[in-house]
Image: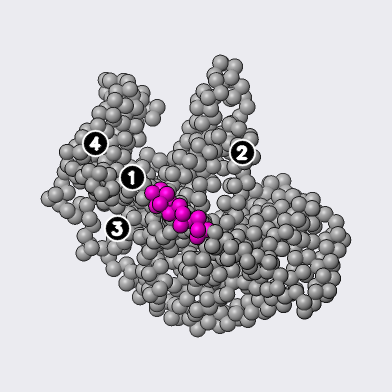
């Protein structure tokens, strides 16, 4: 922007001094104008002809069926072996008396973190018992107990391999990026064909999803081991394996334990998805079943059981990772012993079903929520319809398609489009005359997008826009990479569905950026606000993805608005945290210099803290984008269209090609957005000398 401003003020030779961003915006604007002018005579500029698309779905499907056919006999043996292990672990959890398990969890909490963690474990497990879902919860724990070791071993091995052989580090990181951006449902179809229907498929899907966080943290931890420690290990004369396992891995223990924490949380977040394809009577299946029956009370309580497990596992594993202080093991043993004594005293007299004191509460909660929702149905419908008709729909199909007499009270006409675009052009010109040429061009581009609608954008315009943003953010290499990836989506035959997914993710990210940025700003300005916001962020980050659908379905039923809210609830946390972290981490000397020059608190925030925090805030935006795409496929369960819908259709039809190509297309969208934001963040860090 500053370069654009300088170029605009220097009238002689102004075109030679325009910034890279200004040139990019100008090219995008001209491309859009050209597409609009030629759309009537060349309709293929707007809608990519289906005849031009390549049969990627068929090619991938045929190739995968051949490959899976070769692998199926061996994988079915693996499935049988894992099934035996899972059945044994499941029997152990269900055979263990509930007082013993509660005592063990409480005692472990004491040893790991003292009274607070012990209370968390004891109260949390007691709530699970009282909910009436003890048996289903034990089935869930058995799935997590088997999938997590698999993920830890696989992820740890990959992390060590990438550390020991730097040449393959880039390849490994690329594969992990793909694993974390491809929606889980996309690779469920080939897993079903390989391993058959049952709990083992959910187990393997959980392990695949949970392995990348472990691999990343193992690699990061080993890379951060101080050089002095490595040199001491070499000088001690040990072999390479001895140096690695006796010195370097223990030195990286803290970061590796963070990976264990993230691995546990990732596996737990998969329990409902595992239930979808596993047919396993666990807590995930209970959530799914009660949601389908619209039983609000049971669904909410079942979801809260998953949240309780998530909070207990998160707090205890994170405490193990971040602190070295441990409490008296004898007291922990005594607490577990009390559980054994209680189990003996209650033997045969207090089965888990008989202790389920919250069973009546389910019916009461279901009845009460239904009554409240019925009474406020008009207000809730007004909120949903208002957001859809006056917000989401215009962005999706444009003002010329969304403004209709029965919603807005009048019909959008060509004259209105001319006035709208003309007003935007005047506003852009005013910005340009003040030296903000790029801002003026961007304003006009956004006006054109709003008038047309994201799902109706001409494909040449979108490709040129991606190339221009990539060139601005990171040069020709990034532009070529991102444009090439988008061309793959274009020729896959899923372009229109990709635009719908891009629209919903885009509006969700925009809402998260605005609201999350404001909340992060308030949290940075006021410690009291942060004390109130922090536990909410902690809770939202520990809730598995599927649980976000429960409250929005209760209030707004199935629909695009419910999906939008669920995505925002899940994706807003990184924006809040990174915005606050960036603003409060400004060096003290910069703030003192600004204050000594007479700057007010607002000027310090705007002129000093915000520019310095820009790279961190951009990283928060990057995470928000990835979170939004991760939630997008889950949100497809509540009525959205786009790539998520194609993935679910592929799962129901056992169409491997459609599932993989749709998942790859969604991963490409997320990857392109990720690389573009990272490019701007890197550029900003370089400008600040960081």
- The residue drawn where x is 52% and y is 68% is 290
Q: Earlier in the sequence, mark 4 or mark 2?
A: 4
Q: Quadrant of residue 189?
A: bottom left
Residue 66: % across, % down: 40, 78
Q: Alpha carbon of mark 3 to alpha carbon of mark 2: how far? A: 41 Å
Q: Alpha carbon of mark 4 to alpha carbon of mark 2: how far? A: 41 Å
Residue 319: % across, % down: 71, 52
> Circle 2 is placed at which residue position?
530
Q: Alpha carbon of mark 1 to alpha carbon of mark 3: how far? A: 22 Å
Packing grade of label 1 (10 A; few <14, some 14-19, many >=20) is some
In the image, 523 versus 582, the foreground residue is 523
> Circle 3 is placed at which residue position?
496
Residue contact at pointers 1 and 2, CB within 8 angstroms:
no
> Could you tell me if residue 411 is visible in this image?
yes
> Eyeballing the image, is 262 above or below 292?
above
Packing grade of label 3 (10 A; few <14, some 14-19, many >=20) is some
Residue 357: % across, % down: 68, 66
> Circle 4 is placed at which residue position?
420
Residue 355: % across, % down: 71, 70
Q: Quadrant of residue 283?
A: bottom right
Q: Earlier in the sequence, mark 3 or mark 2?
A: 3
Q: Which mark is residue 390?
A: 1
**Quadrant for the N terminus in the image:** top left
Per the rendered image, the range of residues in magenta is 369-384
Is 456 on the left or on the right of 216, as rendered?
left
In the rendered structure, does residue 382 fall within the stretch colored magenta?
A: yes
Q: Earlier in the sequence, mark 1 or mark 2?
A: 1
| Secondary structure category for the residue under label 4 | helix
> Eyeballing the image, is 557 above or below 572?
below
């Amino acid at each position: 922007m500053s370069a654009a401003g300088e170029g605009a003020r220097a009238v002689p030779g102004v075109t030679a001094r325009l910034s890279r961003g200004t040139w990019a915006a100008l090219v995008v604007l001209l491309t859009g104008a050209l597409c609009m002018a030629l759309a009537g005579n060349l309709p293929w500029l707007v809608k990519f002809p289906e005849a031009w698309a390549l049969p990627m779905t068929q090619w991938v499907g045929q190739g995968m069926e051949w490959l899976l056919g070769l692998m199926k006999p061996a994988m079915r043996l693996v499935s049988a072996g894992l099934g035996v292990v899972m059945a044994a672990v499941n029997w152990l959890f269900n055979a263990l008396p509930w007082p013993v398990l509660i005592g063990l969890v409480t005692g472990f909490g004491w040893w790991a973190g003292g009274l607070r963690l012990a209370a968390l474990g004891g109260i949390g497990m007691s709530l699970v018992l009282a909910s009436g879902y003890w048996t289903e919860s034990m089935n869930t724990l058995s799935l997590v107990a088997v999938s997590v070791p698999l993920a830890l071993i696989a992820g740890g091995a990959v992390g060590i391999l990438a550390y020991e052989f730097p040449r393959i580090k880039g390849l490994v990181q690329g594969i992990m990026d793909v694993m974390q951006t491809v929606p889980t449902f996309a690779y469920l179809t080939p897993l079903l064909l390989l391993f058959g229907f049952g709990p083992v498929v959910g187990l393997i899907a959980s392990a695949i999803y949970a392995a990348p966080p472990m691999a990343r943290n193992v690699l990061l931890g080993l890379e951060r081991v101080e050089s002095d420690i490595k040199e001491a290990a070499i000088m001690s004369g040990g072999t390479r394996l001895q140096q690695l396992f006796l010195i370097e891995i223990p030195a990286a223990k803290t970061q590796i334990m963070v990976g264990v924490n993230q691995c546990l949380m990732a596996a737990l977040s998969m329990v409902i998805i595992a239930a979808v394809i596993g047919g396993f009577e666990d807590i995930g299946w209970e959530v799914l079943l009660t949601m389908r029956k619209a039983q609000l009370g049971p669904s909410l309580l079942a979801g809260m059981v998953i949240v309780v497990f998530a909070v207990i596992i998160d707090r205890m594993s994170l405490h193990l990772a971040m602190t070295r202080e441990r409490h008296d093991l004898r007291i922990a043993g005594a607490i577990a012993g009390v559980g054994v004594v209680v189990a003996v005293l209650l033997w045969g007299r207090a089965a888990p079903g008989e202790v389920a004191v919250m069973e009546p509460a389910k019916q009461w909660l279901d009845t009460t929520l239904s009554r409240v929702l019925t009474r406020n149905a008009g207000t809730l419908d007004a909120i949903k319809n208002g957001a859809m008709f006056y917000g989401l729909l215009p962005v999706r199909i444009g003002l010329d398609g969304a403004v209709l007499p029965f919603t807005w009270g009048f019909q959008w006409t060509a004259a209105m489009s001319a006035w709208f675009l003309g007003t935007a052009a005047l506003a852009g010109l005013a910005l340009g005359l003040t030296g903000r040429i790029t801002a003026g061009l961007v304003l006009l581009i956004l006006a054109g997008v709003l008038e047309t609608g994201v799902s109706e954008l001409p494909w040449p315009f979108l490709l040129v826009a991606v190339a221009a943003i990539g060139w601005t953010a990171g040069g020709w290499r990034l532009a070529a990479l991102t444009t090439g990836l988008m061309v793959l989506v274009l020729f896959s035959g899923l372009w229109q569905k990709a635009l719908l997914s891009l629209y919903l993710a885009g509006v969700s990210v925009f809402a998260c950026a605005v609201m999350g940025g404001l909340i992060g700003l308030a949290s940075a300005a006021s410690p009291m606000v942060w004390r109130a916001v922090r536990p909410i962020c902690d809770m939202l980050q520990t809730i598995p993805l599927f649980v976000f659908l429960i409250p929005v379905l209760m209030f707004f039923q199935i629909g695009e608005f419910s999906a939008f809210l669920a995505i925002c609830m899940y994706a807003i946390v990184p924006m809040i945290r990174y915005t606050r972290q960036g603003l409060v981490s400004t060096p003290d000397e910069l703030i003192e210099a600004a204050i000594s020059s007479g700057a007010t608190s607002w000027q310090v925030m705007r002129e000093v803290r915000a520019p310095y925090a820009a790279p961190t805030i951009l990283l928060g935006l990057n995470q928000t984008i990835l979170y939004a795409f991760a939630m997008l496929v889950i949100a497809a369960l509540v009525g959205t269209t786009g790539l998520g819908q194609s993935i679910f259709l592929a799962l129901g039809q056992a169409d491997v090609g459609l599932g993989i190509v749709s998942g790859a297309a969604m991963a490409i969208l997320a990857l392109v957005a990720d690389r573009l934001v990272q490019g701007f963040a890197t550029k900003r860090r370089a400008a600040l000398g960081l």
